[in-house]
Amino acid sequence: MFKVEVEQEVDGRWIAEVVDLPGVMTYGATRAEAMTRAQALALRVLAERLERGEDLPEVEAVFSIVA
């Protein structure tokens, strides 16, 4: 399960990061938008790793949202 950390920046934007996948960090105007973008980016990163034959972490579920 990948943890998505979400917090609101001082300027009002939301930032979401998938901690276990370096570089997977996104912004959104809303909390939901930031989470959705981070999940989509994480899936793209995992798909690229899979296509390249790289090791993927074993997970029972894909995401866990952390406030």
Image: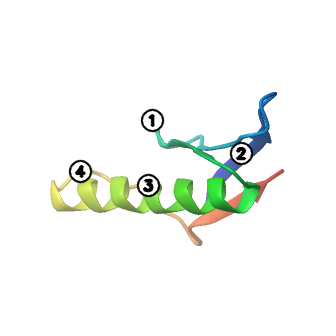
Left or right, 4 with reference to 60: right
Residue with the mark numbered 2: 5
What percent of the width, then of the height, locates residue 1?
Answer: 61, 61
| Amino acid at the residue labelled 4 | Glu
4 or 3: tag closer to the N-terminus: 3
Residue found 25% across the figure and 61% down from its top = 50
Secondary structure state at the residue bearing disc 2? strand
Around disc 1, counting alpha carbons within 10 Å, would you say few (fewer than 14), some (14 to 19), or many (20 or more)? few
Q: Quadrant of residue 19?
A: top right
Residue visible at 73% across and 55% down?
A: 30
> CA gap, disc 2 to disc 1?
13 Å
Task: Please tell me whether mark 4 sits on a helix, a strand or a loop.
Answer: loop
Residue flagged by tag 2: what amino acid is it? Glu
Name the residue beneath numbered marker 3: 41
Closest to the observer: 31 or 5? Answer: 31
Q: Is residue 22 above or below residue 1?
A: above
Q: Give the left or right position of residue 5, taking residue 63 as reference.
A: right
- The x, y position of residue 48, in whole percent, is 25, 56
Q: Position of residue 27 (x, y in %)?
A: 60, 43
Q: What residue is shown at x 78% (from left), y 41% (from top)?
A: 7
> N-terminal of the two: label 1 or label 3?
1
From mark 1 to mark 3, how far is it between C-alphas? Answer: 9 Å
CB of mark 4 within 8 Å of CB of mark 1?
Answer: no
Spatial distance from mark 4 to mark 3, Cα to Cα? 17 Å
Q: Taking 24 as reference, is 42 above or below it? A: below
* SS assignment at label 1: loop
Taking the spot 64% from the left edge, 60% from the top edge, the residue there is 33
Instruction: Measuring from the top left, give residue 18's x and y in whole percent.
Output: 58, 46
Dot 2 or dot 1, earlier in sequence:
2
Question: Mark 2, residues whose alpha carbon is within 10 Å: few (<14), some, or many (≥20)?
Answer: some
